[in-house]
Amino acid sequence: MDRLRPRHRKSFTGFTKTEIEKMEKMLEVSRETVLDKEFCQYVARAFSRYSDRAGKPVVKWTEVHNWFHNAKQESAKASKNVLELAGASLPVKSSVKPTAEEKNQDLSELEFEARSSKDGAWYDVDMFVAHRELITGETEVRVRFVGYGAEEDEWINIKKGVRERSVPLEHSECHKVEVGDPVLCFQEKDDQARHYDAHVLEIQRRMHDIRGCRCIFLERIDVMRPVWDSFAED
């Protein structure tokens, strides 16, 4: 009697690009529940029904759970690297020295901003998704900006493009700003508002009124601009 041929179950070969994009959004929206068994089972069943998974092995909930677990670990490692950097070499953003109390604040409470390579402007950081070491020895983090989705994530050099979030001066603090000081300049142009690094060239001190500071600051923007925009902001 002939022996029955054993059935070979196809092994899981990884998630599709579409599935990964969906899980990234789930991680962003439901970060605290993505490791729950019921949640992972629901995601696995949904993925297994996708038409582009026809002929491929079904997705197990444990595979979904492992992906979320690894993604959260990568995010935590990236955040830790940035926090360590913050305690060691954050760029100075004003001429005012921080107090001892400010220096000793819990680094885990710090908020960050990062400079986009697309337009050279600084944006608030929502989360650090991952990190990687380059062959040069430098570290990059994958940044998700506040108000933007995963499709706008960017790899950014920690030392050159990430720093503690800038805090605007109060109207009564304008006397602290001097010619030559580095500042973060808010610029509105073509129905878009961005923040760029700049230096103060000239200051016209004026009396304040009920609206607050009326001084005029002439600033030169110092920014990593695209070639087509290199002459437009002097």
Image (cartoon, rainbow, N blue to C red):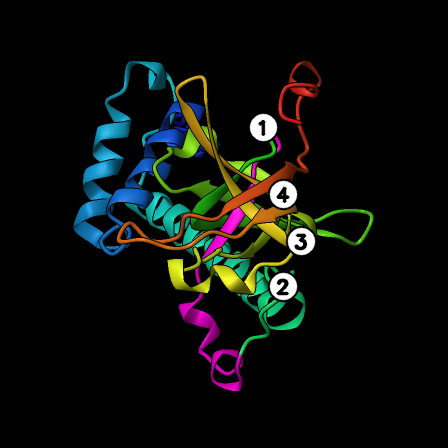
Q: In this view, does 58 lie above or below 145?
A: above
Asked if the residue under mark 3 is in contact with the one under mark 4, i.e. CB atoms within 8 Å, the reply is no
- How far, Cα to Cα, is label 2 from label 1? 22 Å
Query: What whole-number distance in Å separates the C-alpha atoms at marks 4 and 1?
Result: 15 Å
Which residue bears the numbered disc 1? 119
Viewport quadrant of the N terminus: top left
Taking the image as drawn, is residue 16 in sight? no
Amino acid type, callout 4: Ala
Quarter occupied by residue 177: bottom right
- What range of the chain is rendered magenta? 99-118
Q: Mark 3 and mark 2 in contact (Cβ < 8 Å)?
A: no
- As drawn, is 222 to the left or to the right of 81? right
Mark 4 vs 2, N-terminal side: 2
Label 1 residue SS: loop
Depth order, front residue of 72/139: 139
Instruction: Estimate the spatial distance between the alpha carbons at disc 4 and disc 3, rounded to whole Å.
Output: 11 Å
Near mark 2 (Cα within 10 A), the count class, few <14, some 14-19 or many ≥20, is: some
Residue occupying image coordinates x 57% and y 56%: 163
Horizontally, residue 107 falls left or right of residue 96, namely: left
Mark 2 / mark 1, whichever is N-terminal: 2
Residue type at the position of mark 1: Asp
Residue 198 badge: 4
Instruction: Tell me the SS state at disc 2.
Output: loop
Front residue of this view, candidates 161 and 102: 102
- Residue 210, position as x, y percentages in the image: 26, 53
- Position above or below: 1 against 44: above
Which marked residue is nearer to the observer: mark 3 or mark 1?
3
In the rendered image, which residue does mark 2 sit on? Answer: 90
Does the residue at mark 4 contact the one at mark 2 (Cβ under 8 Å)?
A: no
